[in-house]
Image (cartoon, coloured by chain):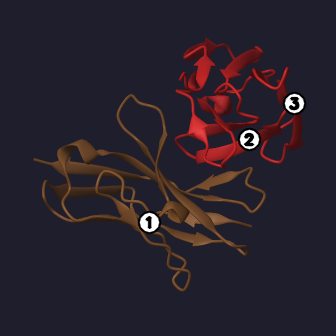
């Protein structure tokens, strides 16, 4: 069975501070992981996926297979980063996303 | 181009009634997915279509839930004899050549 855990329901930081949203996973196959973001009153949208190795809006995430983690990081948080962030794992068949419970990020001015 | 669309955006119904939720995927996307987002359960996978067939129905919570897809495009999720615990936001997503899933805005279902 696959499982994604986001231990923090809420993370509050000040503007300009570093931010790290934690994600741990459990999966017997070769994991492919994503971060999705949902801004207020907007649809869920892809932020980044680990195979792309991109930095989107200043966010990066590194897959650590030893620690089974895929933490999302940004060195300097901005107020517009305030949103719900979901970590997700896709199964090998590529047909089902398993989501973590989500972390609400609040960036205070 | 146009993204995934869903209708209605909000649906309020009485317990015991049937409801139909519609999803229009991105044009050309062959895969379509339904998820449910509720306060207690987070985001849960319901069902997946590849073309018109649904090889994976494992996520449907009960036999009151069914879904179909016609013409490899529009999909309808039907909930029969709705219960209060069915209240949630129902999300649809589609994907094309890559397995990146693009989500619609959701339908908020409230069962009174």
- Residue B61 visible here: no
Q: Nearer the viewer, residue B72 or A39?
A: B72
What tint does the image give chain B? red
Residue B108 appears at what percent x and percent y? Answer: 56, 23
Where disc 2 sits, the SS reads strand
How far, Cα to Cα, is label 1 from label 3? 38 Å
Q: Nearer the viewer, mark 2 or mark 3?
A: 3
Q: Out of A60 and B110, give the one closest to the viewer.
A: A60
Across and down, in percent, residue A55 comes to 36, 59
Chain at tag 1: A
Residue A26: percent from the left, percent from the top? 63, 72
Residue B45 horizontal side relative to residue B110, left or right: right
Q: Chain of mark 3?
A: B
Q: Which mark is residue A7?
A: 1
Mark 1 or mark 3, whichever is nearer to me? 3
Q: Nearer the viewer, residue B100 or A3?
A: B100
Q: Is residue A64 left or right of residue A9?
A: right
Residue plotted at (70% across, 19% down): B21
Under circle 3, the secondary element is loop
What residue would you read off at disc 2? B46
- Disc 2 packing (10 Å; few <14; some 14–19; many ≥20): many
């Amino acid at each position: 069975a696959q499982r994604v855990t986001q231990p923090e329901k809420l993370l509050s930081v000040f503007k300009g501070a570093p931010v790290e949203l934690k994600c741990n996973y459990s999966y017997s196959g070769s994991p492919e992981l994503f971060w999705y973001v949902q801004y207020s009153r907007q649809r869920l949208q892809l932020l980044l996926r680990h195979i792309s190795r991109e930095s989107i809006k200043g966010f990066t995430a590194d897959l650590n297979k030893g620690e089974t983690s895929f933490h999302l990081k940004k060195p300097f948080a901005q107020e517009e980063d305030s949103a719900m962030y979901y970590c997700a794992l896709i199964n090998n068949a590529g047909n089902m996303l398993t989501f973590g419970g989500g972390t609400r990020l609040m960036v205070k001015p | 181009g146009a993204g995934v669309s869903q209708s209605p955006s909000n649906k309020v119904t009485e317990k015991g009634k049937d409801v139909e939720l519609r999803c229009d995927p991105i044009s050309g996307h062959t895969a379509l997915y339904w998820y449910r987002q509720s306060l207690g359960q987070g985001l849960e996978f319901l069902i997946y279509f590849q073309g018109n067939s649904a090889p994976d129905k494992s996520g449907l919570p009960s036999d009151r839930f069914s879904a179909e897809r016609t013409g490899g495009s529009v999909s309808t999720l039907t909930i029969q004899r709705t219960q209060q615990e069915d209240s949630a936001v129902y999300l649809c997503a589609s994907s094309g050549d890559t397995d990146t899933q693009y989500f619609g805005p959701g339908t908020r279902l409230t069962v009174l």
